[in-house]
Amino acid sequence: MTARKIIIDTDPGQDDAVAILLALASPEEIEVLGITAVAGNVPLALTQKNARIICELANRTDIPVFAGCDAPLKRPLVTAEHVHGKTGLDGPTLPDPSMPLQDAHAVDFIIETLRNHPAGTVTLCPLGPLTNIATALEKAPDIAPRIAEIVLMGGAYFEVGNITPAAEFNIYVDPEAADIVFRSGAPITVMPLDVTHKALVTKPRNDAFRALGTQVGEAVALMTDFFERFDKEKYGSDGAPLHDPCVTAYLIRPDLFSGRHINVEIETTSELTLGMTVADWWGVTDRAANATFMGDLDADGFFALLTERLARL
């Protein structure tokens, strides 16, 4: 099978880091054309740095990393240091990157890559707020029909919100950007909290990362040790959800996931439900389906895949 060409758009974040590592460990299924950083979990100066730290951890300094938008389209930036720590990658002690940041803007890289590859051959994988993707679509509307698929982590329906009572963080940070993306006509697959909250790093699963006995295994174990303290306290769960690796796991093993092709609209005006992903799960409107919204996950299969692939790095 031919490896799927992807751009990872990200705001690392410990779970973003694991998603990137999984992609870089899976060259048979995934060819990472580049990584584009966006402001989200922490400001852009840290997300672009963290993306390069992760590439170096995986010994993949050949991956080009681009800095993108440093603020949402119409709103002040909301960040999540309360979850991810002041660096975004708190937990392990990782050296500052020596690989360079690319000179081009992330949005221009996204546009040029989609224009230069045959239509329908490049998949976009946003792991953070959708500012870079929406900006590219606004700047170059011709790219929308060229996108093979947008596989994103964001939103929620039955699990509702994790940053407000109604909204998931990535969508809430830039709801206008999310609205542009969901209206773009590109094929969209969504990994909402409904799925990611089933990808819990329990102690045995984290012990398996640590038992790999590698720098990557230890770093991943320390990252999840760090950010699970927030989720265990908040949700009373047995561990922290690994949100973003669901995106890359889906590219490798789509059979691990199940969902429905439904209509998803983004709330952009209500003070009460700003950033909510209004998912017509039960088909009660006549609005056209625009996204495959995942609802379930084979968690044991997911962690078996993740551990097996991380062992390669």
Image (spheres, rainbow, N blue to C red):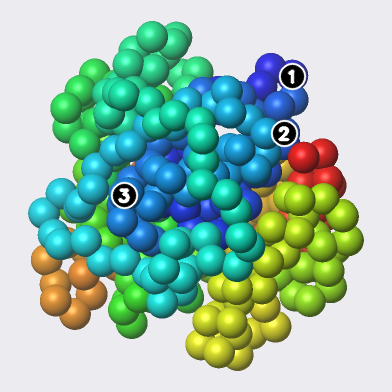
Most foreground residue, 17 or 150: 17
**x and y percent of residue 264 in the render?**
34, 55
Of residues 260 and 143, which is closer to you in this image? 143
State which quadrant residue 195 falls in. bottom right
In the figure, is residue 188 to the left or right of 220?
Answer: left
Residue occupied by mark 1: 1
What quarter of the picture does the N terminus occupy? top right
Secondary structure beneath disc 2?
Answer: loop
* Nearer mark to the viewer, of 1 and 3: 3
Report the disc number at residue 26.
Answer: 2
Marks 1/2: CA–CA distance: 12 Å
Few, some or many residues within 10 Å of mark 3 (<14, 14–19, 20+): many
Q: Quadrant of the C terminus?
A: top right
Q: Which circle, 3 or 2, is nearer the viewer?
A: 3
In this view, 199 is above or below 132: below
| Amino acid at dot 2 | Ser
Mark 3: which secondary structure?
A: helix
Q: Is residue 139 above or below residue 232?
A: above
Q: Given this view, does label 1 or label 2 mark the residue nearer the observer?
A: 2
**Which residue was labeled with disc 3?**
44
Image coordinates of residue 119 in percent, x first then y, are 42, 14
Amino acid type at image mark 3: Leu
Whole-number angstrom distance, CA of label 3 to CA of label 2: 27 Å
Q: Identify the residue at horizontal 63%, vertical 62% (top origin).
A: 92
Asked if disc 1 and disc 3 are in contact, CB closer than 8 Å, the reply is no
Q: Residue at x 58, y 44 (%)?
A: 54
Q: Residue at x 32, y 31 (%)?
A: 106
Decide if residue 81 is on the left or right side of residue 293.
left
